[in-house]
Amino acid sequence: MFDLEKEFDELMHSHSLFKNEHYLRYFYPSEEVVGRDNELRKLFLLYSNLLIHPNSSINVLVQGASGVGKTTVIKHFFKDFTKIAKQHNIDIKYLYFNCRMTSTYQILIKIARLFNKAFPERGLRREEIIEFISKEIHKNKASVIIILDEANNIIKKEKEFLYYLTRITENFGFKQEKLSIVGIVKSEKGLLRIMPNIVNYFQKNLIVFNTYSANELFDILKDKANRAFNTDIISNAMISYAIELLDGNLDVRAAMHLLYKAGKFAEQGKASTIKMIHLQRANISLFPYQYISFEFLKKMNIHQLLFLYSFTILLEKNKIEYASVKKIMNEYESQCVKRNFNPLSYSTIWNYLHIFEEESILKVRVVSENIKGRKARLSLKNISLEQLQPHLINSINNQEAILYGSK
Ligand SMILES: Nc1ncnc2c1ncn2[C@@H]1O[C@H](COP(=O)(O)OP(=O)(O)O)[C@@H](O)[C@H]1O
Ligand SMILES: [Mg+2]
């Protein structure tokens, strides 16, 4: 199929790192579901009942934090499920609603329009629309699945709506049938408070989407990166590094945005691949709340400051993104000599590393931990060289003034 948007994108990006940057835009519907096999299997197990008993109905509650793929998975599942059912001459229709953007009245109209395309958009009372739907569902062969994404919004606005919907056919004397509801919520707690009955109703079929592990996130990002960037623009190591930078915040949206921004920074810098520095810059620009207040520098002793300063000198001088503790020690020792301090030992400095890590200034990667020589590589985290270095120089000058002043 000719896809104008894709073609357009490709033309615009013929000289860029991006092939199709919209794959990294989180509001663009995902091309494919990566992983989530268990959840897909559960959905299939539940809804396969409709294939055998087309007159039945299955209500499911999907729960999970934001950005864990609920919308993506549910949309994909029902698109494929209804398509394959159709190939087997089973008529199952589904309607997707984001309840944050749709009123319950609009939802009812859209359901009514499944049966009559010319159903009037306004003028009818709710009860009349519900009666129409109810009768049509009873008459028709088709099963209908209503997906209510961000369903908490509905419940906040209209307590009764969900209740009505689940009972739509019962209200009119028919056994509830052929109308299934999939509710998607972040948390079931709100629901439980407002409508305990409804939650019980759904709870038999609750599918919980847990947050992604770093490995799952890697697979998703790799897939997005392959679609978004030209070949060999971003390595697996850089994708892993992006995940490290997120520091436990394994939100796919944030991760996608990080790769997108890093790609933009790399382009601006005319780089041919995405490097650590681009991801670091992207991270700082995306999460300004992680900006370090530099208060922590006041708590550090002169040696800790000099060590950090030596690290920044190496990064700056050699235009590198990480340095080994050993190399930093050499620089640190010469800084001490310059200033008439006795340098501390390797092992004392080693013990400081976790303090730097705790303050989120550094990422420490231990390369070898054998007894003879512990080795680690340090890189900056959540902070750029340009930001850190002036503050370090300032703090060192202050401490020196105090130390010498008190002599
Ligand atoms: N398993 C997955 N496979 C592919 N893309 C995913 C997956 N999980 C999340 N995403 C991507 O992350 C973004 C957020 O996912 P979404 O389904 O909207 O999460 P939720 O509805 O749970 O908030 C989407 O842009 C989507 O492309
Ligand atoms: Mg969603």
Image (cartoon, grey):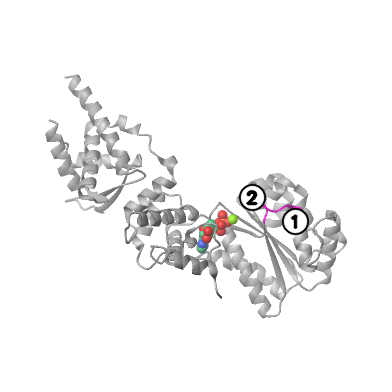
In the rendered structure, the answer to whether residue 321 lies left or right of residue 327 reads: right
The spot of residue 56 in percent (x, y) is 75, 69
Instruction: Rate crowding at label 1 as few (under 14), some (14 to 19) or many (20 or more) other CA atoms within 10 Å.
Output: some
In the rendered structure, which amino acid carries the disc numbered 1? Answer: Gln
Task: Check if residue 402 falls in the magenta segment.
Answer: no
Q: Residue furthest top?
A: 406
Q: Is residue 301 visible?
A: no
Q: Which of 398 and 386 is in front in this view?
A: 386
Quick check: is the Cβ at mark 1 less than 8 Å away from ligand 2?
no
What distance separates the C-alpha of mark 2 from that of mark 1? 24 Å
Residue under label 1: 106
On-image quarter of the C terminus? top left
In the rendered structure, the answer to whether residue 18 lies left or right of residue 374 reads: right
Q: Can residue 52 be seen in this view?
A: yes
Q: Residue furthest bottom?
A: 88
The spot of residue 154 in percent (x, y) is 71, 50
Residue under label 2: 188
Segment colored magenta: 98-107
In the rendered structure, the answer to whether residue 48 lies left or right of residue 233 reads: right
Which mark is nearer the camera, 2 or 1? 1
